[in-house]
Amino acid sequence: MKRSTLVLLIILLAAPFSYSQLWKMRRWEANLGAGPSFFFGDVGGYTIGKNLLGFKDLTYLQTRFNVNGNFKYRFTRNLNGRVSLTYGIFHATDQRGSNEGRELEATTSLFEPSVMAEYYFVKNYSETSWLFARRKRAFIFDLLKSLDLYAFGGVGGASYAVKGNDELISREMQDGGFTMVIPAGLGATLIYSPNLNFGLEVGGRYALTDYLDGYTSQYSKANDVYYFANLTITYKLKTGRNGLPRFR
């Protein structure tokens, strides 16, 4: 009787710990994202004082798109490392804004590799639940318990090519190059199942160049900036005994 009571007590004490370590079974994550891209350069836009926090520069006609792929590794339950590859397109024109008389227009295609860290300041409870261990999907009333919120930042590079109209070319347009970029932003992830996450991520990049649109003005006071807003889907890979991801 005493032995069975002791065994039961050990199981009860060990269960919460074992569930809390479930994330270690899926340290590796493959992630895909897609969404709109927003560019803030020297072509187009409103001058300071005529622009409400930059919102006037956000227009449907100037919005383009981006797609990205990410491979992540969970160092701890709250900290991820991430390698990211992104392809994006930007468009800028003087047809709307404070410089319509210049008539400049530019389209930029960009490829951005980057290395980042993600810190989860709000972590879901699903990964430590019995339902999660049993591979049950989250119920609607459990959505808030299945939500992650995180911040990310890192360093990357951007290889870019610019196509301009005749007016821009005549102003000694730079048709491309490579620059370092500093990415940072916020994201939210919904833990749908032990293998699958859905999310939303918004991040900006500060470029160490002012020529992403091929042009800089004498009135420019800062380098170019661009933003991505992405819907994401994540597949979590099982971790093998050697610590590497298992693809089968």
Image (tube, rainbow, N blue to C red):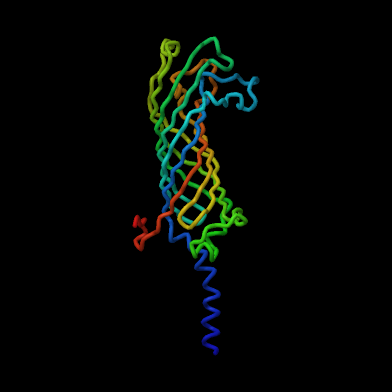
In the picture, the quarter occupied by the N terminus is bottom right
Q: 150 above or below 173? A: below
Q: Nearer the viewer, residue 142 or 21?
A: 142
Who is closer to the viewer here, 123 or 119?
A: 123
Quadrant placement of the C terminus: bottom left
Relative to residue 34, is residue 236 depicted above or below?
below
Residue farthest bottom in this picture = 1
Q: Is residue 110 found left or right of 185 in the rendered image? A: left
Which residue corresponds to the image point at 49% horizontal and 36% vertical from the top-left?
35
Say whether residue 83 is left or right of residue 136: left
- Up-down relation of residue 185 to residue 29 (above or below): above
Q: How many marks overall?
A: 0
Q: Which of the 4 quarters of the picture holds residue 84? A: top left
Residue 101 in the image: state x and y as whole percent.
54, 9
- In percent of width and height, residue 82 lies at 43, 46
Q: In the rendering, at what x and y percent does residue 15 appear?
A: 52, 71
Residue under the point 43% across and 49% down? 72
Residue 233, image x, y percentages: 47, 46
Query: 42 or 16, which is in the foreground?
Result: 16
Which residue is rendered at x = 45% and y = 11% of the image?
A: 167
Picture quadrant of residue 68? top left
